[in-house]
Image (cartoon, rainbow, N blue to C red):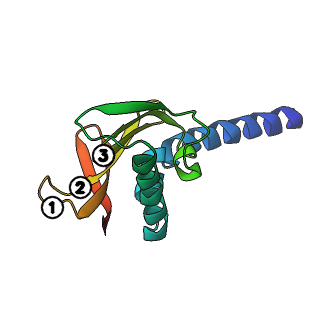
Amino acid sequence: MRNFQIITALAILTILAAVGFFLFWPDSHSRFRHRSNAYYAEFARGCDSLLAQHPWGTNDFIELSGTNTQLPKIIQDLQPSKIKVSSNQVWILSQGGKFGISWEPETETKTNVWLLITSVESHARIVYSANR
């Protein structure tokens, strides 16, 4: 009888721990949004390298595979689903469409300031900006 109580208690604790893990563990978007400025600067450099590798002089874009081994490691680490590169933007759809990231000029006329923006559903947030 005592063994049954111990096994039952351990099973209940395991179930509660699993539920707590899934309810309170931050999702990938939250983890990305709470990185350091040094991380964002490195991420922006990775995006800049994509812009340099795939220059476009028009409004067209190219789509890259998220599994492309030539992507910068910092971008690969996000396990992107889709990447689009145009003449003035890198757009990344991360982890099965859970959230998006873009690296783009602040405005069409203010192209020397670039923004790293995350978006999930209809909420967008600037996490980093830099002169370029």
Q: Which mark is residue 105?
A: 2
Q: CA distance from mark 3 to mark 2?
A: 7 Å
Circles 1 and 3, Cβ within 8 Å, touching? The answer is no
Q: Is residue 17 above or below residue 128?
A: above
Q: CA distance from mark 2 to mark 1?
A: 7 Å
Residue 117 coordinates in the image, percent (x, y)? 30, 52
Circle 1 crowding by C-alpha within 10 Å: few under 14, some 14–19, many from 20:
few
Q: Residue furthest left?
A: 109
Q: Give left or right: position of 132 versus 15.
A: left
Q: Quadrant of residue 11?
A: top right
Name the residue that disc number 3 marks: 89
Label 1: state its secondary structure. Answer: loop
Q: Which mark is residue 4?
A: none
Residue 99 coordinates in the image, percent (x, y)? 38, 39
Circles 3 and 2, Cβ within 8 Å, touching? The answer is yes
Look at 15% across and 55% down and name the residue there: 107
Q: Of marks 1 and 3, which one's residue comes earlier in the chain?
A: 3
At label 1, the amino acid type is Lys
Q: Is residue 97 above or below residue 45?
A: above
At label 3, the amino acid type is Gln
Circles 2 and 1, Cβ within 8 Å, touching? The answer is yes
Q: Which mark is residue 110?
A: 1
In-front residue for pair 55/27: 55
Q: Give left or right: position of 80 versus 77.
A: left
Q: Give left or right: position of 95 versus 73.
A: left
At label 2, the amino acid type is Pro
| Residue 27 visible in the picture | no
